[in-house]
Image: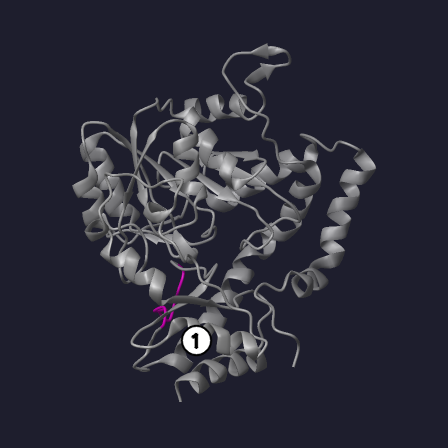
């Protein structure tokens, strides 16, 4: 059996090496390493794939979130609601801009931001909501947009983990995650579903004026060289990373299907087990692209299971072991433990198994048998 990887980028590269190498070679031949043709080509290709008016490439996913908030003109002291159960980058940029983070609990089923918790957290100072499409599953954007419209709030989608996922609406329509809020950010970190071979990110919006503002922000506030019209940053996607992303973008839906197929096999193996709650996955799954495949372990020792798997050579991880409201950098007397019952439960239960485009049946069987072996 091939060695099991948490993310097998090497095997993925081997399958598309000719395409990737040719795309990179074009950049090397042109020597336009910053804002070259590959960057503009990728921007247009991603706009077409997402059916969104504007994609603004930038240096990484964290910058993308920061630039989105800067573009919206949020001011120090403005309150921004986001999920407590996620990676720190989401709250990090809120704090960096001297905005006021308002962390709220998540839903026990989909692990995305709780709609009821959002409603309870809104105050006269609230200016924005940042839903995170966690682990590749689209958040309930229809409900979030309804709340935002009722309270005149901005919605900034953190789409770092769910590019390619669809959001379903009650009228039967679908839109890509990241194209529904006023603005969205994504990351092209190598392990993402659409990852480059370094750092990279992008911002999406259908708002022409906002797109114009953000295009200036990413390039030192310049629209004309040496004319600084807005306060900006230096955050550009370099041409080689754009070339990699251009080569991989046509495979994104196939990558998503491979992840969904693996998730379906995982969940079938764990179905009905009294100690395992596996992600639900429908027959035609397009709302979840499985950036992570995350189990909940109940009435059992999750940490002992993790060690059992590691001892058998199976990589696994806990995303995320400490809630944001408990992190030293973001602790606040406003937060009370009883406000986060689901998050506090999840951090004790979750464990993520290997998930990538190259998992084969032999590996999946070994992983699932090893999990079940622990309980037997």
* Residue at 63%, 11% in the rendered image: 226
Colouring used for the render: one colour
Check the image and name the residue furthest to the bottom.
376
Check the image and name the residue furthest to the top.
227
**Picture layout, residue 354 above or below residue 172:** below
Q: Which residues are magenta?
A: 278-286
What SS does tag 1 mark? helix
Q: Quarter holding the N terminus?
A: bottom right
User: Would residue 206 be visible to someone looking at this image?
Assistant: no
Question: Where does residue 269 sit, x and y in percent of width and height?
Answer: 42, 82
**Picture layout, residue 136 above or below residue 324:** below
Identify the residue position indicated by label 1 in the image: 304
Question: In the picture, residue 267 is in which quadrant?
Answer: bottom left
Tell which of 144 and 132 is nearer to you.
132
Tell which of 74 and 15 is nearer to you.
74
**Picture layout, residue 373 above or below residue 146:** below
Q: Quarter holding the C terminus?
A: bottom left
Dominant secondary structure of the residues highlighted in magenta in the image: loop
* Residue at 19%, 52% in the rendered image: 338
Tell which of 284 and 371 is nearer to you.
371
Question: In the picture, residue 43 is in which quadrant?
Answer: top right
Find out whether residue 113 is within the magenta segment: no
Question: Where does residue 23 sit, x and y in percent of width and height?
Answer: 73, 46
Question: Where does residue 28 sit, x and y in percent of width and height?
Answer: 80, 39
Q: Is residue 113 left or right of residue 329?
A: left
Q: Is residue 245 left or right of residue 68?
A: right
């Amino acid at each position: 059996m091939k060695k099991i990887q948490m993310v097998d980028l090497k095997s993925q590269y081997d399958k598309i090496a000719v395409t990737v190498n040719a795309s990179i070679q074009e950049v090397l031949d042109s020597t336009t390493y910053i804002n070259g043709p590959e960057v503009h080509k990728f921007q247009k290709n991603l706009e077409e794939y997402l059916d969104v008016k504007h994609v603004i490439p930038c240096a990484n996913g964290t910058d993308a979130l920061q630039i989105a908030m800067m573009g919206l003109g949020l001011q120090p002291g403005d309150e921004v609601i986001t999920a407590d159960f996620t990676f720190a980058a989401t709250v990090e940029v809120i704090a960096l801009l001297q905005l006021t983070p308002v962390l709220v609990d998540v839903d026990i089923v989909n692990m995305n931001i709780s709609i009821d918790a959002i409603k309870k957290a809104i105050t006269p100072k609230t200016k924005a909501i940042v839903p995170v499409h966690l682990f590749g599953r689209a958040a309930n954007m229809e409900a979030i947009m309804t709340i935002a419209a009722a309270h005149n709030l901005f919605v900034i989608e953190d789409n770092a983990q769910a590019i390619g996922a669809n959001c379903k609406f009650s009228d039967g329509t679908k839109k890509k995650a990241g194209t529904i809020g006023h603005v969205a950010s994504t990351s092209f970190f190598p392990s993402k579903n659409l990852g480059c071979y370094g750092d990279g990110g992008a911002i999406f919006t259908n708002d022409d004026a906002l797109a114009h503002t953000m295009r200036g922000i990413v390039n030192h506030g310049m629209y004309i060289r040496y004319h600084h019209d807005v306060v900006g940053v230096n955050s550009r996607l370099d041409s080689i990373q754009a070339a990699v992303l251009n080569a991989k973008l046509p495979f994104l839906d196939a990558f998503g299907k491979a992840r969904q197929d693996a998730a379906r096999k995982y969940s079938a193996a764990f179905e009905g087990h009294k100690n395992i709650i596996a992600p639900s996955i429908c027959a035609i799954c397009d709302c979840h692209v499985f950036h992570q495949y995350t189990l909940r372990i109940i009435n059992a020792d999750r940490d002992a299971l993790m060690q059992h798997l590691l001892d058998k050579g199976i990589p696994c991880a806990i995303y995320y072991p400490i809630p944001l409201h408990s992190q030293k950098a973001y602790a606040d007397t406003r937060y009370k433990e009883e406000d986060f019952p689901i998050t506090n439960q999840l951090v004790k239960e979750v464990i993520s198994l290997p998930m990538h485009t190259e998992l084969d049946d032999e590996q999946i069987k070994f992983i699932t048998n090893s999990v079940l072996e622990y309980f037997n």
